[in-house]
């Protein structure tokens, strides 16, 4: 299963929820070997959810689809001398023998950050908001495009490091650094 939009992701998850079918979420697969092995009947590939939705250099944020490669985001940010402060690490050499940083959602799901974490913080400190689909197939949204968003619980912090167990991420908004 490889849906191309959030509505299709919602329908698939809703169907699997109703039939109690275990489902594995997969982006590029760069971090698939990390963590417990899943016993799932179906795999939901989110790889078609790819691309930069909005980049506002003057507002210091970028909004992307979940499976946008980190490399693509970094290249776009470089054109305005900006960067992702959580310093995405490249585990591709370890698992595949070649460079593969993975996707934006992969970094949120694992909360992996490089050595700049000590200076700038981790992924959870730079995720402003997200859209996604919960385990019942409901589309949810948390956060926004500004740093000070004080209404309700900050689910953005919760999904970081959840390994895709809480939500199938479809869109992500990151704070960028000059």
Image (cartoon, helix red, strand yellow):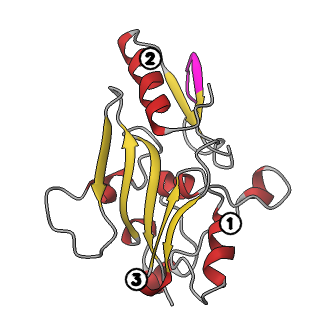
Q: Nearer the viewer, mark 2 or mark 3?
A: 3
Residue that carries the numbered disc 2 in the rendered image = 16
Residue 160 point in image, percent of width and height? 40, 56
Relative height, residue 21 to residue 85 (above, below):
above
| Mark 1 / mark 2, whichever is N-terminal | 2
Of residues 85 and 142, the one drawn nearer to the viewer in this rendering: 142
Residue 74 point in image, percent of width and height? 64, 74
Residue 36 point in image, percent of width and height? 55, 36
Measure how far apart labels 1 and 2 are at the Cα level.
Answer: 32 Å
Look at 55% across and 28% down and name the residue there. 38
Q: Quick check: is 51 in the magenta stretch?
A: no
Of residues 41 and 97, the one drawn nearer to the viewer in this rendering: 41
Residue that carries the numbered disc 3 in the rendered image = 59
The disc placed on residue 22 is none
Residue 79 point in image, percent of width and height? 66, 84
Residue extending farthest to the left is: 151
Look at 39% across and 43% down and name the residue there. 132
Helix, strand or loop under label 3:
helix
Helix, strand or loop under label 2:
helix
Residue that carries the numbered disc 1 in the rendered image = 72
| Mark 2 / mark 3, whichever is N-terminal | 2
Left or right position of 123 against 142: right
């Amino acid at each position: 299963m490889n849906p191309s939009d959030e509505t299709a992701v919602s329908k698939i998850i809703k169907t699997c929820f109703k039939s109690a079918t275990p489902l594995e979420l997969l982006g590029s697969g760069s971090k698939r070997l990390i963590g417990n092995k899943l016993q799932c009947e179906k795999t939901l590939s989110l790889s078609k959810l790819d691309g930069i939705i909005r980049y506002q250099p003057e507002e210091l944020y970028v909004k992307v689809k979940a499976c946008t490669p980190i490399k693509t985001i970094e290249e776009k940010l470089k054109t305005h001398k900006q960067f992702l402060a959580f310093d995405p690490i490249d585990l591709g050499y370890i698992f595949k023998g070649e460079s593969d940083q993975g996707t934006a959602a992969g970094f949120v799901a694992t909360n992996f950050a490089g050595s700049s974490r000590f200076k700038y913080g981790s992924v959870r400190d730079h995720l402003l908001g997200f859209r996604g689909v919960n385990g019942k197939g409901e589309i949810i949204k948390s956060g926004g495009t500004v740093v000070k968003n004080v209404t309700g619980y900050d689910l953005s912090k919760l999904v970081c490091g959840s390994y895709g167990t809480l939500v199938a991420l479809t869109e992500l908004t990151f704070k960028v650094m000059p």
